[in-house]
Image (cartoon, helix red, strand yellow):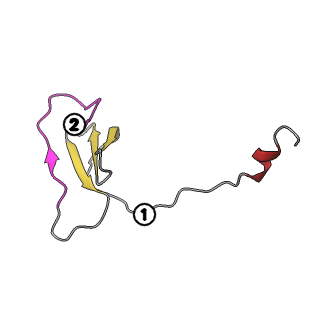
Amino acid sequence: ETPGAADAEKRFQPFRLMAAFGTCHDDITCLDWSPDGQLVAAGSKDLACHVFSGERREGYRAPALAAHRAPLVGAFFSSR
């Protein structure tokens, strides 16, 4: 087998937009997925961290953890 032949078999699989969330009011500065992959936390320059659901959930509204004093530089879920 020629070196690099396996690479020739690889195909580009573009990302597909599944959903768009519009509640952050400024640039997003950090992201973290929950350990179970159901939620994503997005911190932004609007001084808030929004917790979005990866799937549509009836009646779910993304909470905003607000009133920070500076733009967020990290958002993390606990593994326990």
Q: Which residue is drawn at 17% across and 61% down?
A: 61
Q: In which quarter of the image is the N terminus?
A: top right
Which type of secondary structure does the marked residue at label 1 adopt?
loop
**Disc 2 to disc 1, C-alpha distance:** 25 Å
| Residue 37 magenta-highlighted | no
Judge from the rendering whether residue 29 lies leftward or rightward of residue 15; answer left or right: left
Q: Which of marks 2 and 1 is in front?
A: 2
Q: Would you identify the image quadrant in which residue 47 lies?
A: top left
- Kind of residue at disc 2: Ser
Between 52 and 7, the residue placed more toward the observer is 7
Q: Where is 52 relative to 79, above or below?
A: below
Residue 57, percent across and down?
A: 22, 67
Give the residues in magenta: 61-80
Between disc 2 and disc 1, whose residue precedes?
1
Which residue carries the number 2 mark?
Answer: 78
Q: Where is residue 52 in the image (x, y as percent from the top left)?
A: 26, 54
Residue designated by label 1: 18
Which residue shows up at 46% across the image and 61% down it? Answer: 17
Residue 76 position by quadrant? top left
Q: Which residue is drawn at 22% across and 49% down?
A: 51
Mainly helix, strand or loop, the magenta region? Answer: loop
* Residue 48, picture quadrant: top left
**What residue type is disc 1 on?**
Met
What residue do we see at 29% from left, 29% from top? 73
Instruction: Classify mark 2: residues with Cα within 10 Å, few (<14), some (14-19) or many (20+).
Output: few
Residue 71 place in picture, x, y as percent: 25, 31
Residue 73 sits inside the magenta stretch: yes
Answer few, some or many: residues within 10 Å of disc 1's Cα (few below 14, many 20 plus, some between 14 and 19).
few
